[in-house]
Amino acid sequence: MITLQNDQLKVVINELGAQLHSIQRVDNQIEYLWQGDPASWDRQAPILFPFVGRLKDDQYQFNGQTYHQTQHGFARDRKFAVLDQSATYVLLEQHDDDETRKAFPFAYSLRVKYELTGNQLAVTYSVTNPDAEQSLIYAIGAHPGFNMPLSANGRFDQVQLSVSPAETYSRVVLDGPYNDSAHPLTIDMHQPLTIDHDLFKNDAVIFETGGADFTATLTDPASQHGVHVHTHGTQHVGVWSPYPTKANFACVEPWWGIADNVAADGQLLHKQGMHRLAPRGTDDYHFSIQPF
């Protein structure tokens, strides 16, 4: 485990998947990050790469070959190496090998930077295509889970979700695990939304953010503690908690990608929400977590 600390935050990171393991404020020592439970969700903050969401039949076709890949990709289950580290910063890397090529026939480097800046944890994902000829086709996303409520006398069904800008958003509907973006709903977020478990009976609530800066905030009104997740350049931000299993956490998920469309034909070149990174190119993705 890797520990970062400044005068306001203490954060622990697991090299397996470069997954966040703990987020605490120094002044109150509240654990903001979900600690995992096999009865509901045994992960904490997986990195989603090279796919976000589920593929139809857990497979896709590329260059005449069929490849099998489970939901959210494989990066979350592979170790990252530490490239650089200080008291408040760490840079980790994972890259392709013979095993990844069985599920994803591309060369890649995925670097993850965590850095404490005041009362925020800044996160940067950097994807590099080392191939000199072939474009890298991928999606990436984050899936941090936050304890909700954050007080002994709070209740999950009192937790409030608010967003900034506070406006009406297009909401992508899920049909099972697949997106039905051709038939969106709207969700009015001019005022905070009090969440409950039934909100997630059809899986995640997915905001179409269109690349604009977007902040999602979870607040426990019993304690007035909560967390802001500031996103930059995402097309979608998902909010999720398990259903029908009930657990006291909610995830705020910046996505640069999305699950297969209900009309997907299985061809990687046609898949919705994928990025195409030119040979020798690098793209960066940013978000930050601000507990309060």
Image (spheres, rainbow, N blue to C red):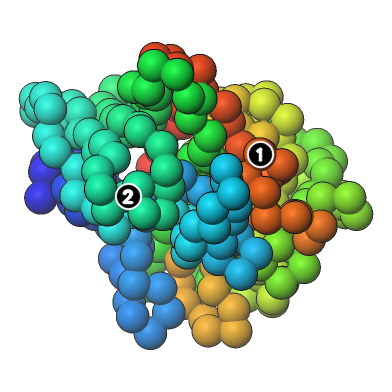
Residue 264 visible in the displayed image:
yes
Q: Residue at x 62, y 45 (%)?
A: 268
Say which element carries label 1. helix
Say which element carries label 2. helix
| Residue named by callout 1 | 269
Is tag 2's residue or tag 1's residue first in the polypeptide sequence? Answer: 2
| 212 to 272, vertically: above or below | above
Camera-side residue of 42 and 169: 42
Q: Residue at x 42, y 43 (%)?
A: 105
What amino acid is at disc 2?
Thr
Give the percent coordinates (x, y) of residue 72.
48, 56
What amino acid is at disc 1?
Leu
Give the percent coordinates (x, y) of residue 244.
60, 84
Camera-side residue of 31 and 158: 31
Question: From mark 2 to mark 1, how far is it between C-alphas?
Answer: 19 Å
Q: In which quarter of the image is the C terminus?
A: top left
Q: Is residue 57 left or right of residue 199?
A: left
- Quarter assignment of residue 55: bottom right
Q: Which residue is drawn at 67% across and 49% down?
A: 267
Give the percent coordinates (x, y) of residue 193.
71, 56
Residue 35's tag is none
| 213 to 80, vertically: above or below | above
Give the percent coordinates (x, y) of residue 128.
37, 23
Q: In this view, does 84 lie to the left or right of 211?
A: left
Number of other residues with Cα within 10 Å of mark 2, as a class: few under 14, some 14 to 19, many 20 or more:
some
- Quarter assignment of residue 284: top left
Q: Which residue is drawn at 70% across and 62% down?
A: 178
Residue 22 visible in the displayed image:
no
| Residue named by callout 2 | 100
